């Protein structure tokens, strides 16, 4: 039994009672539990106590402890059995190690204590069966994949080491309070980052990884900020930081919790003053000033000199870059070329045909050709993130829900937010919004749709038109897009919504002015993909080209979709009704987009649209498809299911002329 009460009382008088608050060295110990302990004058453990106990890691036989050790004094290792009595061991013969930073010794009962060459944090590892000890000094270096400083250094030593004896936290910092750092992927190397292999038995080796990184599973999320975050030596995902700037970097270790953490204080700023635009030419794309030249998308900010694009490149064909489409001052290489070959004529090329992510950083004079890491996310995937499948020049993903779909790429050269490398689809083309992400089209996609991107041709599709057998006979809504109805963007407010009045969920119609040759597409969802169609079994008075309905000539039409009878018709509108017992007939005007009628008798007016296709639809009386003009707002409207008689209490004056514009869906009312 070991008593520390008297020692504790004396130390409190000397003003170090704070030690009792953090439970590291001076608690009263009645019995020493079975185990292996570090203690001695060079440590904070004057005798064997729980905080100085070595703990097993992945190998039960290999016990370890990280402790702050002083140069003056010595420490020993105590083996405590079931009787609670420590047996002290000291230095025996030295054991050769391949790692120059560490030292290993056999343990000798009653031997001389161990010392360290300098004060600092050390990891002590004991092989309890073989009675062997390894001493590993712990120092940290920030190690980048690329240059971290302007002088091209890839390593930043964290040489400023402090130890807070009250909280028992060790801090390693870069020597300056802040230091200009260049963005890169990086890790924290313990010592030189070399994995240490320690003998467990004649057949087994205990492996100690010396490379630390953040705990995020994705590179773009593995970033430090000005708050301490946990580190791990069990991950291959490197840390990143996005911008050049003045930073202070610290790694900490808590002796009490046994956890490593790190922070990166400071703020980066975007580079300014470089080119706003960058183009790619060469034999892979075409001669300068032709349509084959492609424009790269800026990353992060206009003028910072960073650009990217997905490209399908042919082996042996060349790539050049220029700040203008005419190719003036074109270049084929920069100081750092990654993943790209420079041929005998100094031109950039690739050895293998395939899909590449091309990233250019003019500030760092870097060109990188990377294997694409392309992802989709959004409500169309249940708010999950999914890597796109790659097949030749094609990328694809299938949605699991109806909702918004986002596309983005990840580059080893960019640690900014995912949206800085997003892309989308507009009218069948792959589009790169660059920094104008707020202006990028929202991309709603229907559930179960396979979205395919052909990067070689910069095109995209949503599986083509939906087979007729997958179009239901009744729906809650029906929509239409086209050149003049959202310009093929299902997220646009200009997309037309069909009406069904009192006709049920199988018959839908929409009245509008259409230009000759304009194309249209219908959908059961206000989204791309499944549910999009241009024809059913019977189509009347229009044609279909490239899975789109084509209108024959300018005019005012009813677009009628009968899902129950599988009919679609696009036919000129006939609009008529009655007012005060007299017929009301609307006639087309010379402008082709308006129709007018003059009311003969005053009273309540009811009007109904008609086309020949309606006559084939059973139980589709005119009252089920009533329309009207609101005399106050002048809106042209449809009577909806459940609504009462339109304008029931309004009396139209005899001689009133009503003109309806079927582009604006507004009316002009001229009373006598």
Image (cartoon, helix red, strand yellow):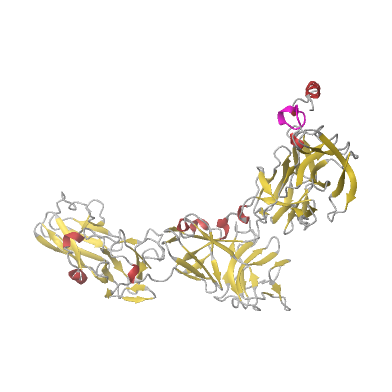
Expressed as whole percent of the image width and height from the top left, the position of residue 533 reads 35, 69
The one nearer the camera, 237 or 60, is: 60
Q: How many marks?
A: 0
The one nearer the camera, 483 or 236, is: 236
Q: Quadrant of residue 521?
A: bottom left
Q: Is residue 375 magenta?
A: no
Expressed as whole percent of the image width and height from the top left, the position of residue 232 reads 68, 49
Q: Is residue 25 magenta?
A: yes
Q: Can you say which quadrant of the picture contains the C terminus? A: bottom left
Which residue does the image show at 84% across and 35% down from the upper left? Answer: 40
Q: Which residues are magenta?
A: 20-31
Expressed as whole percent of the image width and height from the top left, the position of residue 588 reads 22, 68
Q: Residue furthest front?
A: 83
Q: Quadrant of residue 265?
A: top right
**Res. 339 visible in picture:** yes
Q: Residue furthest left?
A: 581
Which residue does the image show at 52% across and 74% down from the upper left? Answer: 457
Q: Can you say which quadrant of the picture contains the N terminus? A: top right
484 vs 170, left or right, is left
606 vs 449, left or right, is left
């Amino acid at each position: 039994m070991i008593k520390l009460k008297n020692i504790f009382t004396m130390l409190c008088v000397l003003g170090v009672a704070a030690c009792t608050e953090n439970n590291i060295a001076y608690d009263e110990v009645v019995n020493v539990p079975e185990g292996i302990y570090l203690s001695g004058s060079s440590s904070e453990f004057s005798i064997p106590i729980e905080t100085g106990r070595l703990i097993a890691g992945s190998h039960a036989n290999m016990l370890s402890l990280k402790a702050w050790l002083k140069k003056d004094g010595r420490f020993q290792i105590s083996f405590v059995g079931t009787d609670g009595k420590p047996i002290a061991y000291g230095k025996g013969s030295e054991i050769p190690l391949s790692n120059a930073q560490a030292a290993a010794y056999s343990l000798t009962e009653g031997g001389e204590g161990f010392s360290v060459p300098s004060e600092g944090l050390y990891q002590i590892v004991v092989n309890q069966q073989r009675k062997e000890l390894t001493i590993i000094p712990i120092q940290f270096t920030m190690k980048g994949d690329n240059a971290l400083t302007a002088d091209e250094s890839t390593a930043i030593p964290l040489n400023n080491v402090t130890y807070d004896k009250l909280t028992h936290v060790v801090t390693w910092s870069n020597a300056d309070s802040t230091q200009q750092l260049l963005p890169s992927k990086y890790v924290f190397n313990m010592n030189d980052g070399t994995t240490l292999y320690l003998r467990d038995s004649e057949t087994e080796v205990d492996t100690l990884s010396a490379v630390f990184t953040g705990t995020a599973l994705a590179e773009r999320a593995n970033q430090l900020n000005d708050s301490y975050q946990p580190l791990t030596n069990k991950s291959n995902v490197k840390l990143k930081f996005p911008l050049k700037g003045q930073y202070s970097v610290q790694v900490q270790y808590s002796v009490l919790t046994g956890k490593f953490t790190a922070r990166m204080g400071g703020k980066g700023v975007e580079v300014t003053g470089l080119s706003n635009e960058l183009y790619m030419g060469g034999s892979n794309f075409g001669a300068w000033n032709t349509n084959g030249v492609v424009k790269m998308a800026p990353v992060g900010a206009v003028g910072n000199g960073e650009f990217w694009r997905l490209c399908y490149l042919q082996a042996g064909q060349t790539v050049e870059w220029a700040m203008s489409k005419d190719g003036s001052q074109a270049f084929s290489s920069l100081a750092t070329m990654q993943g790209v070959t420079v041929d005998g004529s100094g031109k950039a090329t690739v050895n293998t045909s395939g899909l590449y992510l091309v990233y250019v950083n003019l500030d760092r004079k870097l060109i990188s050709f990377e294997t694409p890491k392309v992802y989709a996310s959004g409500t169309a995937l249940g708010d999950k993130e999914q890597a796109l499948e790659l097949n030749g020049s094609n990328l694809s993903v299938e949605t699991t829900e109806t909702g918004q779909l986002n596309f983005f790429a990840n580059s080893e050269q960019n640690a900014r937010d995912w949206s800085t490398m997003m892309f989308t689809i507009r009218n069948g083309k792959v589009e790169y919004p660059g920094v104008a992400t707020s202006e990028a089209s929202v991309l709603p996609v229907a559930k179960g749709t396979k979205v395919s991107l052909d990067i070689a041709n910069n095109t995209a599709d949503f599986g083509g038109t939906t087979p007729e057998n997958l179009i239901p006979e009744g729906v809650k809504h029906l929509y239409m897009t086209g050149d003049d109805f959202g310009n093929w963007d299902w997220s646009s407010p200009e997309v037309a919504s069909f009406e069904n009045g009192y006709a049920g969920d199988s018959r839908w119609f929409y009245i509008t002015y259409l230009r000759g040759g304009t194309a249209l597409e219908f959908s059961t969802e206000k989204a791309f993909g499944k549910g999009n169609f241009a024809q059913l079994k019977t189509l009347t008075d229009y044609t279909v080209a490239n899975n789109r309905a084509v209108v024959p000539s300018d005019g005012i039409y009813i677009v009628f979709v009968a899902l129950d009878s599988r009919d679609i018709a696009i036919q000129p509108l006939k609009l008529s009704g009655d007012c005060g017992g007299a017929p009301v007939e609307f006639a087309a005007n010379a402008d082709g987009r308006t129709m007018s009628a003059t009311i003969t008798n005053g009273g309540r007016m009811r009007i109904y649209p008609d086309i020949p296709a309606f006559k084939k639809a059973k139980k589709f009386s005119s009252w089920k498809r009533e329309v009207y003009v609101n005399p106050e707002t002048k809106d042209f409207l449809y009577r909806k299911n459940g609504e009462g008689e339109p304008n029931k209490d309004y009396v139209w004056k005899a001689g009133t002329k009503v003109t309806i514009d079927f582009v604006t869906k507004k009316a002009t009312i001229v009373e006598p």
